Amino acid sequence: MPFQKTNLLGLSPDALTAFFADIKERPFRATQVIKWIHQQGVLDFHDMTNLTKGLRAQLADIAEIKLPEIVGHQISRDKTQKWLLRVDPENCVEMVFIPEDDRGTLCVSSQAGCLVHCPFCATGKQGFRRNLTSGEIIGQLWLAERLLAENQCEPVSLSKTPRNITNVVLMGMGEPLFNLDNVIAATRLMLNDNAYGLARRRVTVSTAGVVPAMDKLRERCPVSLAVSLHAPSDSLRNELVPLNRKYPIKALLDACRRYVSHAPKDKITFEYVLLRDRNDRPDDARQLARLLKGLPAKINLIPFNPFPDAPYRRPRPAAIEVFRNILLAQDLMTITRKTRGDDIAAACGQLAGNKYIA
Ligand code: SAH
Ligand code: SF4
C-alpha cells in the first residue's frame, strides 16, 4: 500500500490535536494550523510561518490539505449561486449560496447521492454513491468563503466583521445523519472560533429522521435541527419518506422533544414539501397542526420544486395560502419558503451532481 498522507482539512480541533500528539507536538500546534487553514486560507505548509521549519517540512511529508475541485458554476437571476464540485473521478456534489438582505446562507452536501429515496427529490432518485469525508464537507465552506470574497458580493454586517456566509445549512445532497461522524467533525469546525466561529443556531442539520443519530448529534454537537416531516400520517409518510417505515412519526417526534429538552429556547424546524393533491389538503394541514401542537416548532412549507420526470406538481398558490392559514390559526409559526435559484436547478430537491458525469 502506498503511504497515504493525512488530509488535515477535515480534522476537527480534537482530531488535529491528536494528530499532533502522535508526532510529539504540543496542542497549540493544532490551533495554529486550524487558523492557517480555515481563517487565512493557507494550503501550503511552507507558508505557515509560525511553525518551525522542521515541522513545516515534516507536515509536507506526511500530510496534505486537499479540497474538492470546482468543475461548474452558475448564477441565478435572483443571485443564488451554485457550484458543481468533483470529489473523485466518479462523483460530483453541489453547493448553493443564497444571498438575502440580512443573511447569506450556504447550503452544503453531506453525501454523493442519498440512500433514502424520497420520490419527490432529485438526489434521492439518483441513488446512493458514497459518504463525503469531513474534508469534503468543510471544504465546501472553505471554498465558498474564498469564492464569494473574490466575487466581491456585498458582505452582510452582523457584528464587527462583515461576512458573506452567515448561516450554513446541511440541506444539499444526502442525508447528513447517515454520515454522522464526518458531519460532526465538519460542524465542530464551523462553530470553532479559530476556524469559522459560527453561532450554534446559525448551523442547521436537516434530516429525514434518523432517530438514533438525532440523539447522538444532540450529545456531541447540538446545532439547529430541521426535520423533513412532509406528511401528517404514517401511511402517507411511509410513501414520501421511506425511512418512516423504520422510524415512524411518533418515534421521530419523541426524538425531537429530546433534542430540545436541554435547550428550552431552541425550536425545531419542520420542513413540509407541498405536493399537489398528495399532502396539501386542508385536512392534512389540520392533522399536521394536531401533531405538532405543544412542540417548540417552526414550520417551513416548501412548494415542490420540479425536476425532469418528477411524478409530482406544485400546488396552486391559493392552496398553499389556505394550508398555511390553517397552521397559523393554530398558533404554529409557519413560513412558506421562497423558491430560490430554480432557473439553475439550485432549489431544494433539485440537486443531482452526478448527472454531469458521463
Ligand atoms: N436529506 C436531508 C437534507 C437534504 S434535503 C433531508 O431530507 O432533510 C433538504 C430539504 O429539501 C428537505 O426538507 C427535502 O425534503 C427538501 N426537498 C427535497 N426535494 C424537494 C423538491 N423537489 N422540492 C422541494 N423540496 C424538496
Ligand atoms: Fe435524501 Fe433528503 Fe432527498 Fe430524501 S429529501 S432523498 S433524505 S436528500
Image (cartoon, rainbow, N blue to C red):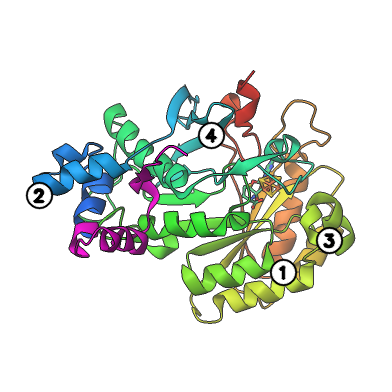
Between circles 2 and 1, the one closer to the viewer is 2
* Relative depth, front residue between 354 and 1: 1
Residue type indicated by callout 4: Glu
Q: Which residue is mark 4?
A: 94
Q: Which residue is mark 2?
A: 52
Q: CA distance from mark 2 to mark 4?
A: 38 Å
Q: Would you say residue 21 sits in the magenta stretch?
A: yes
Q: Verify CB contact (< 8 Å) between mark 1 and mark 3.
A: no
Residue type indicated by callout 2: Thr
Earlier sequence position, callout 2 versus callout 4: 2
Task: Find numbered disc 3 in the image and state the secondary structure of the residue it sits on.
Answer: helix
Badge 1 density bin: few <14, some 14–19, many ≥20, Cα 10 Å: many
Q: Quadrant of residue 117?
A: top right
Residue type indicated by callout 1: Leu
Asked whether residue 41 is in view, the answer is no
Earlier sequence position, callout 3 versus callout 4: 4
Between circles 1 and 3, the one closer to the viewer is 3
Q: Is mark 2 within 8 Å of ligand 1?
A: no
Q: CA distance from mark 2 to mark 1?
A: 51 Å
- Residue drawn at 22 percent across, 65 percent down: 27
Residue type indicated by callout 3: Arg
Q: Quadrant of residue 283?
A: bottom right
Q: Which residue is mark 3?
A: 245
